[in-house]
Image (spheres, helix red, strand yellow):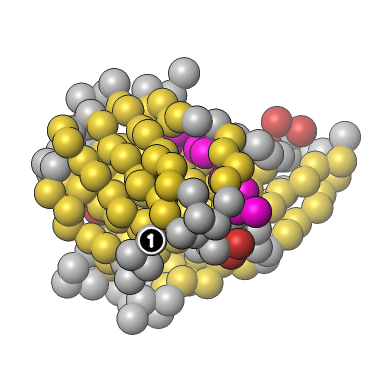
Amino acid sequence: GQQVMQIPQYQHVQEGEDFTTYCNSSTTLSNIQWYKQRPGGHPVFLIQLVKSGEVKKQKRLTFQFGEAKKNSSLHITATQTTDVGTYFCLCSGGSNYKLTFGKGTLLTVNP
Amino acid sequence: ETGVTQTPRHLVMGMTNKKSLKCEQHLGHNAMYWYKQSAKKPLELMFVYNFKEQTENNSVPSRFSPECPNSSHLFLHLHTLQPEDSALYLCASSQVGDYSNQPQHFGDGTRLSIL
């Protein structure tokens, strides 16, 4: 079955430093979505990637989809305290479009 | 205001109780989902309803029973739960179509504690 690994599990940075989380799937994906969950909150949709090698930007956030459509990354430039939260990838793959969330990366930012 | 409302926000119940979780979406979506979120584990997809029809059941124990009377409402009926069922239960909805390709909108969840 489809297995999804997301690394790192935790990342603590100083405000202004960059941050990257990676999502790797054991199977080729049809698409991948990224969500952010603030402490005590619910997951909020950030972006969806569909095409091989796709790169999308949202202000300080850059999302990439690998050429083989088996991995993806989320990069934050110059983190701010408002970036604190857990970032999840949601992978959709296989003939039945099985949905699998990564374990998430908890980002904490020291002001 | 997310457009997806879950009630109750918190629920404490004994193992022999029967209770129900409710989810209502005001976004005009046609697919609804139940997830379980436990500490240190990924979000686990439990059930999916597409146009009121259950399209996915990820080997969830029968003590969890979903019900989707229409595209706007989703219930999760609980009975004879175990302590390991304590978790945050999240409901989500998405637009009609191939549900795996549509962004999901989540409710605030129900924090469930089993005594």
Task: Identify which residue is drawn at 76% across, 33% down.
Answer: A81
Query: Which amino acid type is marked by label 1?
Result: Arg
Quadrant in the picture for residue A38: top right
Q: Residues within 10 Å of mark 1 (few under 14, many from 20)?
A: some
Q: Name the residue at the front extreme.
A: B16
* A100 in magenta: no
Give the side of residue B97 with respect to residue B5, left or right: left
Quadrant in the picture for residue A39: top right
Task: Identify which residue is drawn at 41% across, 50% down.
Answer: B78
Q: Residue A86: x, y in percent? A: 63, 48
* B106 in magenta: yes
Give the side of residue B40 with respect to residue B72, left or right: right
- Chain under callout 1: B
Q: Nearer the viewer, residue B99 or A30?
A: B99
Q: Nearer the viewer, residue B54 or B97?
A: B54
- Extent of the magenta region: B104-115
Task: Identify which residue is drawn at 52% across, 39% down.
Answer: B110
Q: Quadrant of the N terminus of chain A?
A: bottom left
Q: Is residue B112 above or below residue B36?
A: above
Q: Residue A40: x, y in percent? A: 65, 37
Q: Is residue B87 above or below residue A1?
A: above
Give the side of residue B64 with respect to residue B99, left or right: right
Q: Residue A52: x, y in percent? A: 30, 62
Q: Residue B62: x, y in percent? A: 33, 65
Quadrant in the picture for residue B52: top left
Q: Secondary structure at mark 1?
A: loop
Residue at image mark 1? B63
